[in-house]
Every structure is written in C-alpha cells, then in structure tokens.
Amino acid sequence: MAMTGGKMGDMKSDINITPLVDVVLVLLIIFMVVTPLLQRGYETKVPPKVTTNQPPPQNMDQLVVRLTEDGGMFINREQYTERDFLNKLDEVTRGREGKVVFFAADGNLSYDKVARFMDMCNDHGAKSLGIVLEDINPTATSGEAPK
C-alpha cells in the first residue's frame, strides 16, 4: 500500500507545537517575575537588640509554698505551723487570685501527703499552682521509697 499525499490546499490535522511552547515559556517568565513579589511580607519596625550583663530583677511578689519531709510548711523561706500556715496563706493570697503560687515538696514524701498539701493550698487561696521540679532534698533519688 502506498501512501497517498493530500492534494495541494487540503487542511492538515497535525498539531503545531511551536505556539504551545511559546505560550508556556511566556507563562514561565511571568510566574518567575511575579513569585518574588508575592513573597514580600509586611514591614515591621523591630527594636534594636540591647544586650545587658545584668540578671533580670527577681520578682519580690513571687510566692513559693514548700512541704518538707519532716512536715515543715514554708511560705517563701519562713516556716509555719499548720494553723499559722493556713492563716498566712489566706492572707498573702488575698487579691492574688490570678497569680501563680509555686509549689515545692521534698522528693521523699509520699504522694498522698503531697496531694493533701496541694489541696490545702488550693482551699486557702492558691488556685493556680505551679510545680517546682527541682527537688528540695538533693539526697533523695528519683523513685526512692519513702522512709
């Protein structure tokens, strides 16, 4: 079978790739120009970086309650009996409902003693307790049974 060519003037049904490539290249160039413009953010004013060697001032308004292994109850560094502790805690937490009271306990204490102490603190004004993870008894080992 021989192939017969079309007559002169007949239409060809072949796809012309050249215009397609031209359009794709123009779109590529447009996207390459527009993309960096889209990545611009909002201008902000950043304060200058200030370095100081001074430590930040300690917050004298900070409140720490502690329970020791021998049953000592402390507010900051002052030890109180249980009745005095609860009265003083009521006094110092009055007007501080939104502030965090930090809580620390000896690592050798059993869970129920610590939970009862936390409940007492909560009942007497320390609604938001932050737990201090540093053990106040450095000789206790993690997971050691109470003596």
Image: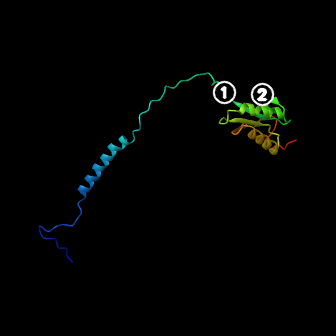
Whether label 2 touches label 1, CB < 8 Å: no
- Above or below — where is 146 with respect to 75? below
Residue at position x 51%, y 26% from top?
Answer: 49
- SS for dot 1: loop
Residue at the right extreme?
A: 147
The residue lying at 21 percent from left, 67 percent from top is: 13
The picture quadrant where one finds residue 79 is top right
Report the quarter where the N terminus lies. bottom left
Q: Is residue 37 left or right of residue 46?
A: left
- Badge 1: how crowded within 10 Å, few (<14), some, or many (20+)? few
Between 5 and 132, which is closer to the camera in this rendering?
A: 132
Q: Which residue is labeled 1 in the image?
A: 59
Q: Residue furthest bottom?
A: 1
Residue 14, labelled with which disc? Answer: none
Give x and y (percent) for residue 12: 18, 66
Q: Is residue 27 above or below residue 57?
A: below
Secondary structure beneath dot 2 equals loop
Q: Amino acid at mark 2?
A: Arg
For the C terminus, the quadrant is top right
Q: Is residue 72 visible?
A: no
| 2 or 1: tag closer to the N-terminus | 1
Task: Calculate the distance from the C-alpha at mark 2 to the C-alpha at mark 1.
Answer: 15 Å
- Disc 2 target residue: 77
Decide if residue 92 is in sight here.
yes
Q: Is residue 54 above or below residue 36?
A: above
Residue for point 79% across, 41% down: 114
**Residue 90 placement (x, y as % from top left):** 75, 34
- Residue 66 is drawn in which quadrant? top right
Q: Nearer the viewer, residue 134 or 104?
A: 104
Mark 1 belongs to which amino acid? Asn
Locate residue 88, reporting x and y percent.
77, 31
